[in-house]
Image: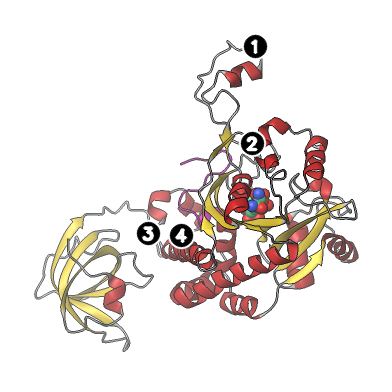
Amino acid sequence: MKHIDIIEILKGQYTDQKVTVCGWVRTSRDSKNMAFLELNDGTTLKHLQIVIDKAVMSDISEFMKLGTSLKVEGTVVKSVVAEDSVEVNAESITVLGVCPPEYPLQKKRHTLEYLRTIPALRVRTNTFNAVLRVRSVISACIHEFFQERYYTYVHTPLITGSDCEGAGEMFKVTTLPFNHEFKTEEEYDAADFFGRRAALSVSGQLEGEVAAMALGKIYTFGPSFRAEKSNTPRHVAEFWHVEPEVAFAELPDIIEIAEDLIKHIINTVLTKCPEELKFFNAHFEKGLIEKLENVVANDFAVMTYTEAIEALKASGKEFQYPVEWGADLMTEHERYIAEEVCKRPVFLTNYPKEIKSFYMKQNADGKTVAATDLLVPTVGEIIGCSEREADLDKLLEAMTIRGMNIDDYTDYISLRKFGSVPHSGFGLGLERIIMYVTGVQNIRDVILYPRTVGTIS
Ligand code: 4AD
């Protein structure tokens, strides 16, 4: 069906021309001689006004129902009320799909909680129209960032035999039906599809490191899976993960790359999504645009974990979880550091080695690792980053202390035997950066179909 995108018509190039447009009715208003519809086709947040002269079209009742899909032929004219806009004087209207009154999106605004119960329809709201476009723009600009800087995009496997984060929060992959034939777990795993235990990957990092040891600079961008039972506004079981891995980069180098990427993302959204940001600024976070402009104009803070613990202790605040050197930081601590202490994004560095992953480079103090998390106000952690342990003996020691099965990681270990180099990388959660850029506070509302513990729709 040949038709013009509404975004093109609203740009004004078709004024005084005959056009065909298609879309869904978002609002309708009837008066004595005229009727007005607002049509949206998803190419922009803005709706196109369709003006109906009732002397020309009398039977308009079907067109007026919200959610109905229409094909409209008519002439584009300057808007009578908004000087800088255009509308279409309808000459003929065809109903493509009727929409009965039980269509749930009748009210102007619905709660996000209610919208989560109608995933197939919530995409038709302004919020999801804006979120999904920002998500698309961010995804494209992430590729642009790396491609322009000589990184190779590699596709790491989603099914894996090793646990990158060592946290054991993996979804098992199996083809074996339930039965009680096996005496041990090992026997059961051996009889399975791969002849050993397999799971959905929590991160492409380990294979990303393999590629970086040949291609120098690589990135992966795909889904990661975590069977964490964290029913929080920041966790989903399936999220999109951006993971660069850079040979010859030490911790300060990778911190610089991470800051540049975040600023590139924000600058791109400021330039390419002004309408969407205005919408989020009005409905989700007052001062959002100013916040984003400030973030790109200023350096991010850098603070050690030890300094953060001191600041938390000195705060006099009652936290739900205790603050002690050696303890993992909770969202309440992370947010306090980013929001109250630094008042901007902050790289927290040099965490105690016991609370971080086996692959992180051990610092000379014997207590900490060269790792950093990027914490941002309102969201908390959006990036997990580290320099990798390039020394074979130290790596093996860290794995042994954690009781890991060395045989599951032979490829990874071999990188330290054959021309090992200092290297670093990080993981950015796509949904978390979208939350930060849009002000949307629940991760379930920045992804088409959220997968969370106990819910799959
Ligand atoms: O800090 P994480 O666990 O780091 C890694 O997976 C490393 N292997 C990355 C690397 O160095 N290549 O996860 C990285 C980021 C987090 O900062 C967060 O933004 C996101 O991934 N993330 C999640 N996002 C949504 N839901 C979850 N359950 C997430 N778990 C991690």
**Viewer-nearest of discs 2 and 3:** 2
Q: Earlier in the sequence, mark 3 or mark 4?
A: 4
Does the magenta segment cover residue 446? yes
- Residue 172 visible in the displayed image: yes
Residue nearer the viewer, 419 or 99: 419
The residue pinned by badge 2 equals 162
Check disc 3 and report the residue beneath it. Answer: 124
Q: Disc 4 versus disc 1: distance between alpha carbons?
A: 53 Å
Q: Nearer the viewer, residue 290 or 261?
A: 261
Compare marks 4 and 1 and give the one earlier in the sequence.
Answer: 4
- Residue 257 bears which disc, if any? none
What residue is rendered at 82% in x and 44% in y? 394
Q: Nearer the viewer, residue 39 or 331?
A: 331
Instruction: Please state, as top left, top right, bottom left or bottom right, where the N terminus lies in the image.
Output: bottom left
Q: Does the magenta run of residues contain 84?
A: no
- State which quadrant residue 202 falls in: top right
**Labels 1 and 3: the sequence-earlier one:** 3
Residue 181 image offset from top left, x and y in percent: 58, 10
Front disc: 3 or 4:
3
Per the model, the C-alpha gap separating discs 3 and 4 is 12 Å
Residue 183 image label: 1
Residue 89 location, x and y as percent? Answer: 17, 78
Mark on residue 110?
Answer: 4
- Looking at the rendering, the stretch of residues picked out in magenta corresponds to 444-457
The amino acid pointed to by label 3 is Arg
Q: Is residue 128 above or below residue 388?
A: below
